[in-house]
Image: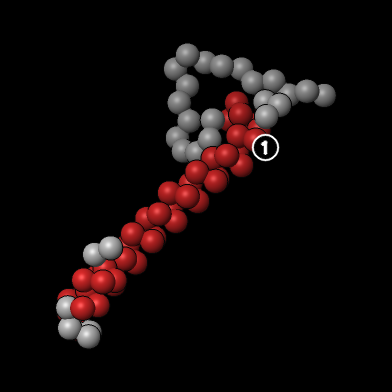
Amino acid sequence: MKASVSSKDNCVYSFGIDPAWFMSSNVLTFTNSLKMKIAVILGVFQMTLGILMRGLNNLYFKEQGTLSFVFEFIP
């Protein structure tokens, strides 16, 4: 038995993926693609935050002078 989705003109879902995707034939491809994009965005954010924190720690604690800041944080 194949499920069907009815559409209303004024229907807005509150959060998440559009429920119509779960009835399509390529739902697995779509959700895997979405999860991969989210993982890349979160990974870039985490790496950027780590680099910024490393630079602030170098400035605050004065680790090995400014040499560490110049050759580790700036590049």
Question: Compared to 29, does 25 lie above or below?
Answer: above
Q: Number of marks in the image?
A: 1
Q: Quadrant of residue 21?
A: top right
Taking 45 as reference, is 9 left or right?
right
Q: Residue at x 58, y 30 (%)?
A: 19
Question: Compared to 73, does 19 lie above or below?
Answer: above
Q: Residue at x 60, y 26 (%)?
A: 20
Which residue sits furthest right? 1
Q: Is residue 52 visible?
A: no
Q: Is residue 64 visible?
A: yes
Tell me the colour scheme of the image: secondary structure
Mark 1: which amino acid?
A: Leu
- Residue identifier under label 1: 28
> Whole-percent x and y of residue 5?
64, 21
Q: Quadrant of residue 60?
A: bottom left
Question: Compared to 45, does 25 lie above or below?
Answer: above
Q: Which secondary structure, mark 1?
A: helix
> Whole-percent x and y of residue 61?
19, 83
Query: Mark 1 packing: few (<14 Cα in 10 Å), some, or many (20+)?
Result: few
Q: Nearer the viewer, residue 64 or 17?
A: 64
Q: Which corner quadrant holds the N terminus?
A: top right
Q: Which corner quadrant holds the C terminus?
A: bottom left
> Whole-percent x and y of residue 41?
43, 49
Which residue sits furthest top? 9
Question: Compared to 32, does 8 lie above or below?
Answer: above
Q: Residue at x 47, y 50 (%)?
A: 40
Q: Nearer the viewer, residue 4 or 25?
A: 25
Q: Nearer the viewer, residue 20 or 43?
A: 43
Q: Residue at x 60, y 34 (%)?
A: 30
Taking 16 as reference, is 47 left or right?
left
